[in-house]
Amino acid sequence: MVAMAIASGALAQQAKLPPLKRQASAEAVVKEHMEAINACDWTRILAQDPANVEIFSPNGVLAQGREAVGAMFAQVVKPFREGGICGLKFTVEHTQKVGDTLNVQWRAEAPFLAQPYRCADAYETKDGLMQAQVTTFRRDDVKTK
């Protein structure tokens, strides 16, 4: 759910990387990810990301490794008015499971949006962790009032 440039030094503003917290299934990994995103909880998001996690975003933006993903999510969990996504509520509309990958169509809503924003992500899980995410989310495409 991220198509933001990785800001250097952003990770330094956050607490150190949290310990890993494995989930019982691919569905549980994605459920925890969505709940953590809705809570804008950087620690919960990163607790599922192993050392070699990768996030593939539009326009060739790629975050490789836990530290880079942590820096990216440090920008994501800012308030919407500051360039983040906090204040949006993400709701899963449809899921297709292929092995340990969940393909998810979702919508984002908020009182300050002109209309709901719909998007899709593929969440590849492995051993109860988020191994990779492919997202079509482009924050600049979200229309506000």
Image (spheres, helix red, strand yellow):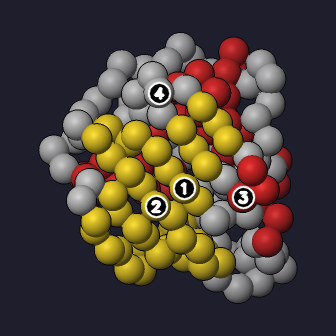
Q: Is residue 34 visible?
A: yes
Q: Nearer the viewer, residue 38 or 18?
A: 18
**x and y, in percent, of residue 20 in the image:** 33, 24
| Residue 36: mark | none
**x and y, in percent, of residue 43 in the image:** 47, 30
Type of amino acid under label 1: Val
The residue to which callout 3 is attached is 58
**x and y, in percent, of residue 3 in the image:** 72, 53
Type of amino acid under label 2: Ala
**Is residue 64 placed above or below 59 in the rendered structure?**
above
Give neighbour class at mark 4: few <14, some 14-19, many 20+ (Cα, 10 Å).
few
Type of amino acid under label 3: Pro
The residue to which callout 2 is attached is 122
The residue to which callout 4 is attached is 52
For image coordinates 65% across by 78% down, the residue present is 117
Label 4 to label 2: alpha-carbon separation: 17 Å
SS assignment at label 4: loop
The residue to which callout 1 is attached is 134
Q: Of marks 1 and 3, which one's residue comes earlier in the chain?
A: 3
Q: Is residue 103 left or right of residue 63?
A: left
Figure label count: 4
